[in-house]
Amino acid sequence: MAEFKEISPNASAGAKLNNWFDNRFPTLFAEYRKHMSEYFAPKNFNFWYFFGSLALLVLVIQIVTGIFLTMNYKPDAAKAFESVEYIMRDVPGGWFIRYMHSTGASAFFIVVYLHMYRGLIYGSYRKPRELVWIFGCAIFLALMAEAFMGYLLPWGQMSYWGAQVIVNLFSAIPFIGPDLSLLIRGDYVVADATLNRFFAFHVIAVPLVLLGLVVAHLLALHDVGSNNPDGIEIKKGPKGNRWSPDAPADGIPFHPYYSVHDIVGVSVFLMAYFGILFFAPEMGGYFLEYNNFIPADPLVTPPHIAPVWYFTPFYSMLRATTDTMVHVLMVIIVLAVILNFIKSRSSTAKKGAIAVIGLIAIGLLAVFDAKFWGVVVMGGAVVILFFLPWLDRSPARSIRYRPGWHKTVYAVFLIWFAILMVLGIMVPGPIFSQGSLEWLTNERVALVGTLFYFGFFLLMPWWSQLGTPKPVPDRVTFKPH
Amino acid sequence: MTSWKKFVFGLALALGATLGAQASSGGGIAWDKAPGKINDNASLQDGVKIFVNYCLNCHSAAYMRFNRLKDIGLTDEQIKDNLLFTSDKVGDMMKAAIDPKQAKAWFGANPPDLTLVARSRSGAGGTGADYIYTLFRSYYRDDSTPTGWNNLAFPNIGMPHPLWQLQGERKPIYSTVESHGHETQVFSGRWEQVTPGTMTPLEYDKAVADLVNYLKWMGEPAQSKRVAIGVWVLLFLLVFTLFAWRLNAAYWKDVH
């Protein structure tokens, strides 16, 4: 145990109180120093570094408003829709709490997508931050589960049929699929049992996992230290700054510098958030879908079922995986094997092994239904993110010092992601209703987009090594305010 | 603009145009703009009268309490005297007068609840209010349907014209358009009055506007309050952002 510290009786009341706690709960002070006042973050953070703290803010908003919503919400197929309208109409301030939660859901994905994009362009997932990135990807996965199950709770038409479609996907998994989807639903169709278990998962199970992962994400980050737009390791640079002789010279204490900085970000974010909440809570049908103002009806299938906007890129990839996609994948595998035989300098045995693996892959593609591969593609699109630290072989961490054309690669990836998002919102079939472009269907464009999406990641070990990186400076680039 | 930025811009334009085109091809004519103002209490009060007299017989508004109408300037007494059946209480929900079983037998389906109809019927073509406003001004006589009525905004609608006594009977005027070598009949946007209603066309349009205005208000009774609070919240945040920005600058002055 640490030495019991005595304090002069003439000390101020504040100092006495501090001393009292410090003698009984020193951990509090140690942790405060470790994570706030003596956590040295690079001083060159830019706009992109707001979104981590904003994600934390939205998490708190969702938890607090969620608690208030559960006080009046009824997880019962006969009462759920009614109870949401009760909250919107009869509970004092209920509409405000509900809109905070519904707007918060979309806001969560906006800030998380931007946060992930930041990690992508500045190489924040590279050694030694692999675990920070993996925890982050797990948070994204948990967030998707949380959003999906929460979306069922209002029990509107889109809630119901969206859940029906997504849970049915699991039945495409060979052998265990039908039983698995039955286990998820608790019934043969989405029903009261489904609503109850989704409610349990949404309000306690997944939030617990999320909170644990967020803590792990932050602890791991504070162990290795933050990356920065230059992708330079400040811990490897010169030591000593105004606050500490052994802290990195380019680091500044998180508190007060970045806490004050983040308040500006929070304030600007809240303007956008409350702007939507008070003036356009439906956000043109993208945050609250029009169809969801109709109570769930198991007998009436809506003409067009689409998930909420934040899932649509992945939904698009699912829809793109038809027999055509399976055939395209087979051709790609054949070409890859042939290319390997011609170009690779490895031994014949290794080449043979790769050919056998390719053959097995083609066999599997042929054996199982395209619907199953759609599920694999959709899941794979998220899972592949976990492997990013090992896919990127670029000598430069940050986009700033990579070859110029790498920016184009990122731009193409981003554009395709946006296109997939839009395609997922649109109805399947020809994109243009008139004219001679009838062959240009939603699925065909999405197929190309899916190939680009996976190509970006799977070919990264190859393309990220190409080109000459620009010289990386020794110190971070920083312009005093 | 660099060439790839132009490309992205063009792509976005094309996609936007496509989304718009897809949305408007959902069957039925393009929607007119509903003229009502959500904080016009006189209009809302006229609207609820039409709603209770003409809609509530078959449709319910099961999430709406009668006494919420106090928000649009009615008193408990006025609600009781003018809008309630004698057996109803002012705190009751707006239930339909019709027996659901009979409704199903007569119309083939249960008339849907109308509490949220102005929200659920929104689409890329406009708001739900726009849609309903258009719907009630697009009825025409059609002997080929079971009810004898049809609608340009909702082809083969199950509901006969509930306000036909007010509007009278009308007929759409078609014009012949030639495209790609064959002629098609296209709605000209004009109507022919076949039999007069108890209201003039102008009075009728106003009545429908009031009804639609009421439906819009009923979809979210908090909406005027929401906007009013929102203005103050944003003003506060604007000032707060200013202070936060200067505070940040003051702290960062000594970082070199």
Image (tube, rainbow, N blue to C red):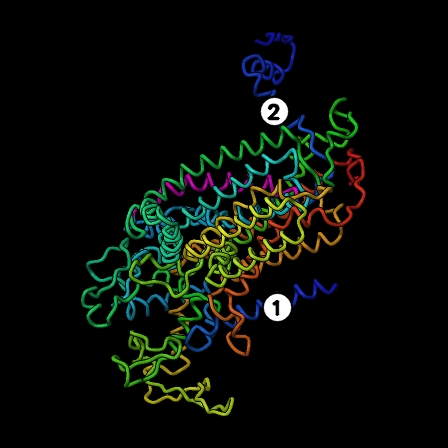
In the image, what residue type sits under mark 1?
Answer: Leu
Q: Could you tell me how far apart the alpha carbons at marks 1 and 2 are, in whole angstroms?
A: 50 Å
SS class of the residue under badge 2?
Answer: helix
Find out whether the residues at labels 1 and 2 contact each other: C-beta distance under 8 Å: no
Within-10-Å neighbours for mark 1: few <14, some 14–19, many 20+:
few
Residue located 38% across and 83% down the image:
B200
Q: Position of residue B2 (x, y in %)?
A: 74, 63
> Is residue B72 in view?
no
**Mark linked to residue A32:** 2
Q: Residue at x 61, y 36 (%)?
A: A130
Image check: B31 left or right of B96?
right
Q: How many marks?
A: 2
Residue B54 located left or right of residue B24? left
Q: Which residue is tagged 1?
A: B13
A270 is higher (above) or lower (below) than B11: above
Q: Nearer the viewer, residue A383 or A332?
A: A332
Q: Which residues are magenta?
A: A49-76
Chain at numbered mark 2: A
| Residue A334 quadrant | bottom right
| Disc 1 versus disc 2: nearer the observer | 1
The local secondary structure at tag 1 comes to helix
Is residue A448 rendered magenta in the image?
A: no
Question: Is the residue A196 above or below the residue A410 in the image?
Answer: above
State the image coordinates of residue B181 (x, y, percent, origin top left).
50, 92
Q: Nearer the viewer, residue A409 or B85?
A: A409
Q: Nearer the viewer, residue A84 or B17?
A: B17
Chain letter of the residue carrying label 1:
B
Residue A187, x across and y down, in percent = 28, 48
The amino acid type of the residue labelled 2 equals: Tyr
Name the main secondary structure of what is drawn in magenta.
helix
Does residue A165 show up?
A: yes
